[in-house]
Amino acid sequence: MALDTRVTTNGTTVTVAFSGELDISRAEEVERELERIEAEGPDLIVFDLRGLEFLDSTGLRLILGADSRARRDGRRVVIVQGPDKVQRVFRITLLDRRLDFVDSPEDAEGSAGSGD
């Protein structure tokens, strides 16, 4: 199955909604899109994983890399939880403890700036 990526901007928040399979076959394309988004300097990047059916280690690396760059640059990355089989990848790797997860995009935007 293919990957569909939908990017929306609301002020200083960019939401990247994935549906399908985020895996090695689409990694280069996603990486280029993330570079473009990050160059615009948003305060918050939201990864919406609700439409994902599959996430492999390469997809995980892309999300983790975006989070690391955001922390370095003073931005935030928030992840809208995906289906259980996607969330399982985060639990197995213990990244569910490191990354910031919410239940909906509205929760992500509502939490922007908390803790500042």
Image (spheres, helix red, strand yellow):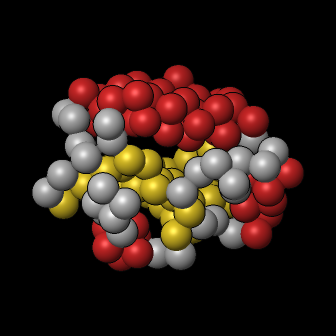
Is residue 40 found left or right of 45 in the rendered image? left
Q: Quadrant of residue 114?
A: bottom left
Q: Is residue 37 above or below residue 114?
A: above
| Relative image position of residue 103 (x, y in whole percent) | 53, 75
| Relative image position of residue 13 (x, y in whole percent) | 25, 55
Residue 22 visible within the image? yes
Residue 26 visible within the image? no
| Relative image position of residue 52 (x, y in whole percent) | 62, 59
Q: Nearer the viewer, residue 8 or 60?
A: 60
Q: Nearer the viewer, residue 26 or 78?
A: 78
Q: Is residue 111 above or below residue 79?
A: below
User: Which residue ends up furthest to the front in the rendered image?
Assistant: 116
Q: Nearer the viewer, residue 67 or 21?
A: 67
Q: Is residue 100 above or below residue 76?
A: below
Residue shown at 64% from the left, 32% from the top: 61
User: Which residue ends up furthest to the right in the rendered image?
Assistant: 92
Is residue 97 found left or right of 41 in the rendered image? right
| Relative image position of residue 69 (x, y in whole percent) | 44, 29
Q: Nearer the viewer, residue 95 or 16?
A: 95
Residue shown at 56% from the left, 40% from the top: 63
Q: Quadrant of the C terminus?
A: bottom left
Is residue 100 found left or right of 39 in the rendered image? right
Residue shown at 46% from the left, 75% from the top: 104
Q: Is residue 44 above or below residue 35?
A: below
